[in-house]
């Protein structure tokens, strides 16, 4: 029988919140993760503890002591057992309550709604002001060294412990509040090395290396497994194989190959599935879209993107996958295209061309926060200006 020790710390946190009656969206807000990630975790939790509903999961959490069961009037705990006919508790004498007290367990929702209302009003004001404001005049940039330094400043960057081995072209992801750096190329060549950074102890540790050393591959976290498709080996061959790393067991496993070799692709995880978009096949840049289903261990080729490219950045925001920048074989691009997986599955046109980057970028990093995109680096200019993009629809 599965016990608490079989669940990860993140899974226990999610199970506790489920037992309080929190929705997927509320859980995502409290743990600062996406609702899609919550769904994937819940699927894994239900499978591990052998339940099929949130009610059964709540009863399991009570039995395992993850949460306290409510106590009824006679002092007996009935939350973790089946009750054939519920007995109504005695009606207490009415006690005057404030509006805040009457909200009860809806207080958190009320606060969230108030905060959301403030944000919406604030954004509306900013949009109106921007719409009617004159176009600003761009002033010449003063070199940093010539700018007057403020009298007081707050430290924004702090040095962290060095990597055990410096390398480029590595894949990275975050699991259970730990940063994983996988494969890449160091001073000795292409490697399968795996290093993990502990945020709490600020230390690096080395773990079981990827069986097939590669560079120019990306990592995608689905549930509690890290997927690394394709990449380029030490001989310069572009590969189609995919290997999966289990951080809990520190083990690797080979799964279904990509439909075709790819490296330097854009990668995104959406609704528990892996999307490998574009990239380099060893001879030319590609526009292909490959979707991987971990449950069936199968790949499906989807509608290609309008612009073939490699070294593009991919991220999920607002229910779609954005693919930004890249290299078309001759030059860096400013292209921004959005892919809707649901439309592709229903036979609709899944790609839209969106507002391009202010300047071409190749090999940039991109992440999403609160459905806004942040593009960092990837330019030949020094310094490379970070950009924020807010999709309007």
Image (cartoon, rainbow, N blue to C red):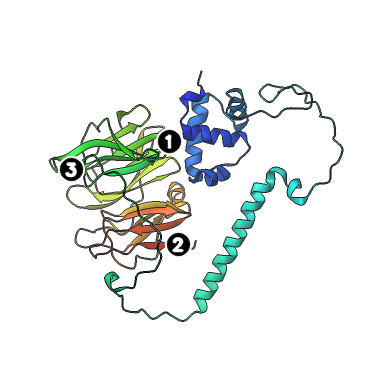
Q: Which residue is mark 3?
A: 186
What residue is at 47 percent from the left and 28 percent from the top? 7
What residue is at 36 percent from the left and 61 percent from the top? 336
Residue 351 point in image, percent of width and height: 40, 56
User: Vertically, is 306 above or below 300?
Assistant: below
Cα separation, mark 1 vs mark 2, equals 28 Å
Residue 181 sits in which quadrant? top left
Can you name the residue that lies furthest to the top here?
A: 1
Q: Nearer the viewer, residue 203 or 177?
A: 203
Of labels 2 and 3, earlier in sequence is: 3
| Circle 1 SS class | loop
Residue 113 point in image, percent of width and height: 63, 54
| Circle 2 SS class | loop
User: Vertically, is 303 above or below 82?
Assistant: below
On screen, residue 276 versus residue 124, left or right, reads left
What residue is at 41 percent from the left and 34 percent from the top? 224
Would you call the spot at circle 2 few (<14 residues within 10 Å), some (14-19), or many (20 or more)?
A: some
Q: Which residue is mark 2?
A: 390
In the rendering, which numbered label is found on residue 223? 1
Can you name the residue that lies furthest to the front here?
A: 151
| Circle 3 SS class | strand
Q: Nearer the viewer, residue 292 or 27?
A: 27
For residue 195, say whether it is visible: yes
């Amino acid at each position: 029988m599965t016990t608490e020790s079989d669940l990860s710390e993140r899974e226990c946190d999610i199970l506790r919140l489920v037992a309080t009656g929190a929705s997927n969206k509320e859980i995502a807000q409290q743990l600062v993760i996406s609702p899609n990630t919550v769904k994937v975790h819940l699927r894994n939790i239900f499978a591990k503890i052998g339940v099929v509903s949130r009610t059964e999961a709540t009863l399991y959490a009570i039995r395992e002591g993850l949460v306290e069961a409510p106590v009824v009037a006679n002092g007996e705990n009935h939350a973790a057992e089946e009750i054939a006919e519920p007995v109504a508790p005695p009606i207490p004498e009415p006690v005057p309550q404030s509006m805040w007290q009457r909200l009860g367990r809806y207080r958190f929702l009320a606060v969230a709604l108030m905060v959301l209302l403030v944000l919406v009003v604030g954004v509306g004001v900013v949009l109106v002001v921007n719409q009617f404001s004159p176009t600003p005049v761009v002033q010449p940039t003063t070199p940093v060294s010539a700018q007057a330094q403020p009298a007081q400043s707050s430290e924004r960057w702090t040095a962290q412990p060095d990597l055990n081995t410096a390398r480029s072209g590595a894949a990275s992801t975050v699991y259970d509040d730990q940063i994983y750096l996988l494969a890449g190329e160091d001073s000795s060549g292409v490697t399968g090395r795996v290093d993990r950074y502990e945020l709490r102890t600020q230390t690096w540790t080395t773990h079981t290396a990827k069986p097939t050393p590669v560079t120019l591959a990306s990592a995608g976290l689905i549930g509690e497994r890290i997927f690394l498709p394709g990449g380029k080996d030490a001989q310069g061959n572009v590969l189609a194989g995919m290997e999966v790393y289990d951080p809990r067991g520190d083990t690797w496993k080979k799964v279904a190959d990509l439909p075709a070799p790819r490296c330097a692709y854009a990668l995104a995880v959406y609704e528990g599935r892996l999307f490998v978009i574009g990239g380099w096949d060893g001879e030319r840049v590609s526009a292909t879209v490959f979707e991987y289903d971990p449950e069936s261990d199968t790949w499906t080729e989807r509608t290609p993107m309008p612009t073939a490219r490699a070294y593009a950045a991919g991220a999920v925001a607002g229910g779609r996958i954005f693919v930004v920048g890249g290299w078309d074989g001759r030059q860096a691009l400013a292209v921004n295209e959005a892919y809707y997986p649901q439309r592709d599955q229903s036979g609709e046109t899944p790609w839209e061309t969106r507002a391009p980057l202010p300047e071409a970028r190749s090999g940039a990093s991109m992440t999403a926060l609160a459905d806004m995109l942040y593009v960092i680096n990837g330019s030949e200019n020094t310094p490379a200006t970070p950009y924020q993009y807010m999709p309007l629809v």
